[in-house]
Amino acid sequence: MPIQATREPSAADKQALKELFYQMPFLQRGQPLLAEMMWVLARRPNPGQHEKILQNYCYNIFDVFMRTSLKGFPSLAETVQVLDQAGLASAKTIAEIKTCLRIHWKNLGRLFGLASRCFRYGELEAEASLERDTPGHSTPERDDELFKVVAGQQWLDENRSQLAGKSFNTVAVEKLNQRIGPQFPKVMEAELMFQKLAYEWGPMAMQEFNEGMAEGLTILLDKDGELAGESGRSGIYFFLLVVWPEIKAMLESNPKKTLTDLHEWMQPFMRVGVTAYIEIETLRDVCAPPSQNGIGISLRPLKSRRSKSSA
């Protein structure tokens, strides 16, 4: 009989979630995920020299995102191609530049539109988004717990004096904008430069660049600041990415863990709500090989059920 999805999380379930991030805080888990996702976004350059630092299933999830949420994200190679580096350095007219440079103007516009949307989210929308995602009144105890889960106890101890009087959400938005804010003037300057270049390049370049800008505004985030183009399984994919250290241990265990073991391990997190409740058969479909539209978590098959004894 399956565990009911409506069961309220127990104190043990909530403690299991805390312990997960006490062992490795969210930001530490996310660093290799972000680095490898950027490599995939760049269309996996120099694959022979690139050392994969995650389990294969993570890259299969990245590929799913490239077909869904990030399907309109162009690579630099698809956007700007230098045909003659030496000629470009000495070019003085648009006619000369055109012989040395190939520009996909719509792709270029998409990149600037996407960047503008992300800057707007960080500056004007992030705090309200966090308020939705972290319901409940801010208290010193609650905020300390969130800092510990996201950044770790050591970070909390080292920065406690700077956090006095600030809520978790306020600090999170400050850190986000400290990271992306300095890039905003540079991107805006580059956008104006390419707007001027498109103007000189020709009417079609202007049209395609601005069409791309409009498309880029909705490539990654929708009007509510949510990821655009998500698949029905996005929530479970995000969870399986975040818990890559634990799944890595399961894949390397001897004997290797089963899908039943994974499903049972996930149940406290389902009840807490950090991932949707799914039946074990659905998890089997999610973890199936990519040839079967799964992400390829190669655990042992489901434990066989005992056959009923004959009467």
Image (cartoon, rainbow, N blue to C red):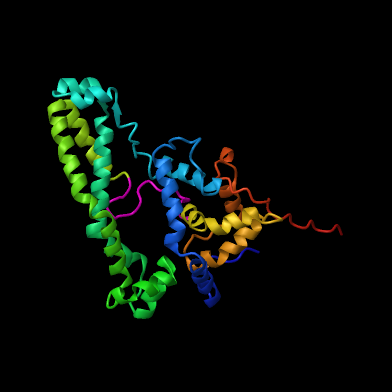
Question: Looking at the rendering, which quadrant does residue 154 occupy?
Answer: bottom left
Residue 280 screen position, x and y as percent:
61, 56
Residue 16 quadrant: bottom right
Q: Quadrant of residue 92?
A: top left
Q: Position of residue 198 (x, y in %)?
A: 16, 31
Quarter in which the N terminus is drawn:
bottom right
Residue 20 % position (x, y): 52, 67
Q: Which residue lies furthest to the right in this view?
A: 311
Q: Main secondary structure of the magenta part?
A: loop
Q: Which residue is rendered at x = 47% and y = 41% of the image?
A: 63
Of 52 and 8, nearer the camera is: 52
**Is residue 124 left or right of 52 when viewed as pictured?**
left
Q: Report if residue 36 lies within the magenta region.
A: no
Q: Is residue 104 above or below residue 12?
A: above
Q: Is residue 58 above or below residue 194?
A: below
Residue span colored magenta = 220-235
The residue at the point 45 percent across, 51 percent down is 33
126 sits left or right of 278 in the view: left
Query: Can residue 35 be seen from the camera position used here?
Result: yes
Q: In this view, does 72 lie above or below 19?
A: above
